[in-house]
Structure formats: C-alpha cells, structure tokens
Image (spheres, helix red, strand yellow):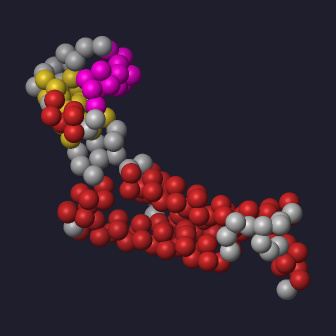
Amino acid sequence: MELIHTLFGEGKELNELQMACRALVIFFVTLALIRIAGMRSFGMKSAFDNIIVIMLGAIMSRPVVGASAFFPTIVAGLVIAVVHRLLAWISMYNKAINHTIRGSFYNLYRNGAFNEAVLKKCNLTEDEVMEEVRASLHDNKLEKVSEINMERSGRLSILKSES
C-alpha cells in the first residue's frame, strides 16, 4: 500500500513521479474508453462525436493533476463512453434520434442558384460558401458546380457537374 501511495500520491500535492505514474495509467484507461466509445467518435468529426473528445479530455485530465479523485473520475469517463456508444447504436435504428443527435443535411446551392433560406438557417453567407469553393476547386466560378451541401458534420461538400 505504501508503494502505491509513493507512486500515485494523494490529493493535489503530487510530485513529478506521481503525476507521471498517474498519466501513464490514465493514458491506457482513456485508450480503453476510446475503444468502448468506438472508432467513429474520432473519425467522423460530427458535433455528436466531438462531444466525447472534449469531455474525455476534460474529465481524464483531472486525476493526472490531482484535481479529482482517481477512480470516480475513471467511472465518469466510462459513463460518457458508454452513453456515446449507446446513443450511436440507437441512432442507427431510429431516424428521429439520429436526426436529433447528428443534425441535418442542407442543400445550399443547386441549379445555378443559392438557397437563401437555407443559407440563413445555416448562418452562412454566399461569400463563405465561395471561400470553400475556391479552396476546394481552386476556382472562383460556379460553372462546374452542380450542388453545394452542408453535411451533417458541418463540412461543405461541393459536387461538380457532369459536363
């Protein structure tokens, strides 16, 4: 028991060795939590998936520096990972929950015209959309563009016309 106290310390008065030991353990615990949450949480980059990244980062840093109790913090991280995984699974089978959790797809431009109502709903201007066109297509014209959409992740996708 004395060895554990020497290696991991207690409270906020931690030395370098204790913080390093805590960081090592938390690294592997967080890796396990990421596996529980699922790989989509770090690959999709939707608002829903970014929540787990932010929350796990905030929660799992606390025991390293002694700001929160070690094991209760790990349990909190586990709850976040399991809830994320459960909601992702439920949303696969329920369109209403999927829409609520992951957001909506919006068509911003089609048939040579911007959809002003949708631009307003997405808090975007034509200039901001054109910035993405220039960055993606290296062109300042929409002649070769058939559609521009805001994906559920918030990214803009630009579809070239067939001709």
Q: Is residue 147 left or right of residue 1?
A: left
Q: Position of residue 116 (x, y in %)?
A: 16, 29
Taken as a whole, is the magenta stretch helix, strand or loop? Answer: helix
Judged left or right of residue 14, residue 52 is left
Q: Answer whether residue 13 is magenta in the image.
A: no
Q: Is residue 133 magenta?
A: yes
Outermost residue, top side: 140
Q: Is residue 53 visible?
A: yes
Q: Quadrant of residue 98?
A: bottom left
Q: Magenta residues, as a range?
A: 124-139
Q: Is 127 on the left-hand or right-hand side of 143?
A: right
Residue at the image point whose x is 86% and y is 63% from the top:
15
Q: Is residue 1 above or below residue 163?
A: below
Q: Is residue 90 above or below residue 134?
A: below
Where residue 125 appears, as percent x and y from the top left, is 27, 26
Nearest the camera: 67 or 34? 67
